[in-house]
Amino acid sequence: MTSLAGAAAQAVTAPGSRFDLLPVVRSLGLVVASMLGLVLLLVAVRRLSGARQLRLREELKRQVRPLLLEVLAEDDPDPDAVQRLVRLGRSQWRAAEPMLITMLGKVRGGREMPSSRCWPPAGRLEVPQIGARR
C-alpha cells in the first residue's frame, strides 16, 4: 500500500487526469512566498526609516536645547536668543516644541501647558497676572 502523499501525487500527475494541480500549487506557493518577502522587506524599510527619523529628531533637540534653556531660564531673556528661537526652521521647531512645553513647566515652576495656551493663533502671548480680574 502506498502512502497518502504518494497517492495524492499520483492522482495529481496521473496521465489520464483532467486537470493537473501540481503547477497550480507551485505557482500559488511562489505567489505566497513572494508576498511574504515583500511584506518583510517593507517592515525592514519602515523600521530603518523610523530609526533614522528618531536619530535626526534627537540631534535637532540636542542643537535647540541650549537655546531654549537660555530663553526660558532668565526673567529677561536676551533679545538675540529670542530672535534665534523665532527663526527656527520647521523641522527644528517640530523637535523643539514638545521640549519647550515640558521645559516651561519645569523652569517656570508650573504644570505643563498645552501649546494652544502658550502660543495662541493670533500671535499674541497672553500672560495672566496674579490677582488680575477681567
Image: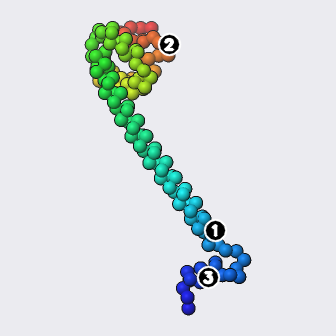
Return the disc, 3 or 1, that comes first in the chain's sequence. 3
Q: Is residue 26 above or below residue 79?
A: below
**Residue named by callout 3:** 10
Q: Are marks 3 and 1 in contact (CB under 8 Å)?
A: no
Residue 118: image location, x then y, percent = 41, 18
Q: Is residue 26 above or below residue 42?
A: below
Residue sitting at x 38%, y 31%: 57
Number of other residues with Cα within 10 Å of mark 2, as a class: few under 14, some 14 to 19, many 20 or more: few
Q: Which disc, if any, is residue 24?
A: 1
Dot 2 amino acid type = Ala
**Residue named by callout 2:** 122
Label 3's element? Answer: helix
Q: Is residue 34 visible?
A: yes
Q: Are marks 3 and 2 in contact (CB under 8 Å)?
A: no
Residue sitting at x 31%, y 27%: 62
Dot 1 amino acid type = Val
Q: Is residue 100 above or below residue 79?
A: below
Return the disc, 2 or 1, that comes first in the chain's sequence. 1
Residue 60: image location, x then y, percent = 35, 27
Q: Is residue 59 above or below residue 4?
A: above
Return the disc, 3 or 2, that comes first in the chain's sequence. 3
